[in-house]
Amino acid sequence: MAKQIVNATPEALGAGILDIETQLRLERFLAYEAALMDEHEYDRWMALWSGDDITYWVPCNDDDQDPSTGIAIIYDDRSNLNERMMRLKDKTAHAYRPRARLVRTISGVVPLKAEGDELEVASSFVLGEIRVGVQNIWFGKCMYRLQDTPEGFRIRSKKVMLLNNDEAMPNLTFLV
Amino acid sequence: MTTLIASSRDYGALVKEDRVHSSIFTDEQIFQDEIERIFHRTWLFALHESEIPKFGDFKRIQLGRFPIIVTRDENGEIQLLINRCRHRGAQVCEAQRGNAKRFQCWYHGWTYDSKGDLVGVTGPEGYDKNFEAEQHALAKVPRVGSYRGFVFASLAEEGMSFDEYLGPTKKFFDMMVDSSPIGEVEVRPGVVNKTMYRGNWKQIGMDGYHPHYVHMSVFKIFSKRESTTGSAVGALHLEDPFADTSLSRTRGFPNGHACLDFREQRRPHAATAIEELERSEEGRQYVADMVAAHGRERAEELVAWHGDPHLGLFPNLQLIHGHVRVVIPISPGETEVLMYPVFLKGVEPGINAKRLRAHEAFYGPAAAGSPDDAEIFERTQRGLLADAEPWVLLSRGIEREQVDEDGSVTACISDEVTQRAQMQEWKRLMTAR
């Protein structure tokens, strides 16, 4: 994510704060997460989240809109996210039927901070969507807090900054 | 100011008492005439005055085809200025909102102040002695009216007064504003869901017949919850407000305004609503302040109503749950919808934070409620293009309408009183001479 990457420490941008192998594991993890979202594999995507105090945040109007004084497009804790999953899977949630066909590419994966077993990671994506004959292209930047566990990386929080978060947008009927 | 395009079309024939012709949703020429005859003639919601509180504050809005700058001038007055340089016509303001004492046209440098007066002309010696700056101020929207901070405008020099336009709907504005213990609300221009759907602007009416089907997935989730605490739509109780056996009513007003009137259905739930609020310190304070401000009886009903008028003002405003909704027609098959959550003044920050969470749970492009509405509007638009059997039925409950003391028409919550009111006003404006 450009602003955070621009402001990152020289170590993070120079030699990097991770060894190459961890960087590759990280990129593979984000590609895997992207594939689960593209394929609407909701349960397997949910299994990537760890802990009860998770936050899945898609700000509205401004990348840094404070949720205590503004709104978000998505601002989910675990219980909200569980309900979102129920709706995404529900055949009567009309906006999600038929499901969108999706493909996204992830790039700019830069770990910015490492603390204990937790990492702060920036990335960006371009996403193509086709649904009921209409093609939309979405762009976004992500900021993750990931935990490195023996089972692999797990998501503690994820913030998705859509490029069009202050424009009139159609339904966002899939995971970003 | 506006030109009425002569029309050979018989719009009266397209709207009958119990049905409308689908071409009014799909036809390009009808859409252009709607902009001229409805959006350039009747009253339109512009903004809430709290959006531009200080001298120099401005916000850009669109009224019909007119780009408008709404400013707060040095006398604290609100000005609605047409965003078009009086020289060659370029827009003089491109920022969506901000604070500026001057608006400069970057084509040739003409400059205007927040009243719209022309205060700077590049190379004035090039104009002859008859040139008067006073004659070249930014054009003003001819008529402006406001009620409880809600500012409306009419692009027509003459017409129905603002007071007559609102008619008996004022008490529904009061429901929203008086849910603040100091009787003031705030709308923030930078806190808004901006959404669009590929469907006609008139589809986004008031409809008490759709929730069980369009929002079935939400009802399913509610049924799995132990209580409605923190419920997405605030005032939905375990008792179904959309049942025809409930005390909820649809209501149609003069001038196309319409309401899903939940007042009687919600009033018996005052005690529960207060009990829920009083679980937190900020909620206890809110209840105490409301009682002190409005008296026990009025405070109880205001709390039970959750500040939700569920009112539609024809043609471009809705006050639903805790938000102000503005409808912007783009083309026959494309509409933008802006949803501004309303902040209560005179309450602890936690009260507004809870309202924000409740709003975003149901409204916005990835929320539980409004995406399904948008989806159904798009399905409707695709269906309406097939006009072999062109009539759209709005007859539900036509035999069980009643007229209230204030002149409004009511019927069961699922009845199409609201749509009939909106369409009769559409017909009146489209056929006006």
Image (spheres, coloured by chain):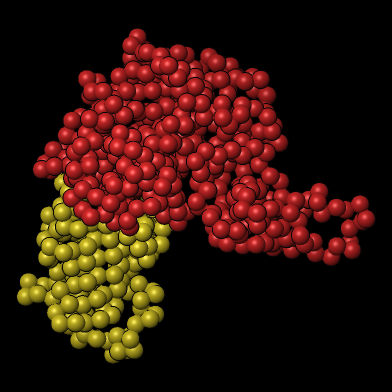
Give the residue furthest to the top. B399
Residue A49 is left or right of residue A69, and the answer is: left
Question: Foreground: B396 or B262?
Answer: B262
User: How far across and down, in percent of the image, does residue A58 sit?
Assistant: 31, 59
Residue B376 is left or right of residue A119, and the answer is: right
- Chain in yellow on the image: A
Chain B shade: red
Residue A25 is left or right of residue B153, and the answer is: left
Residue at left 39%, top 28%? B259
Give the residue furthest to the right. B129
Q: Quadrant of residue A36?
A: bottom left
Question: Foreground: A100 or B301?
Answer: B301
Residue at left 29%, top 78%? A110
The quarter of the rendered structure image containing the N terminus of chain A is bottom left
User: How far across and down, in percent of the image, does residue B215 sit?
Assistant: 25, 36
Q: In which quarter of the image is residue B247?
A: top left
User: How far across and down, in percent of the image, does residue B16 sit?
Assistant: 47, 14
User: How far across and down, in percent of the image, does residue B419 sit?
Assistant: 41, 23
Question: Foreground: A135 or B325?
Answer: B325
Residue B19 in view: no
Q: Quadrant of residue B220?
A: top left
Residue at left 89%, top 63%? B125
**Location of residue B357 with respect to A90 vertically, above or below:** below
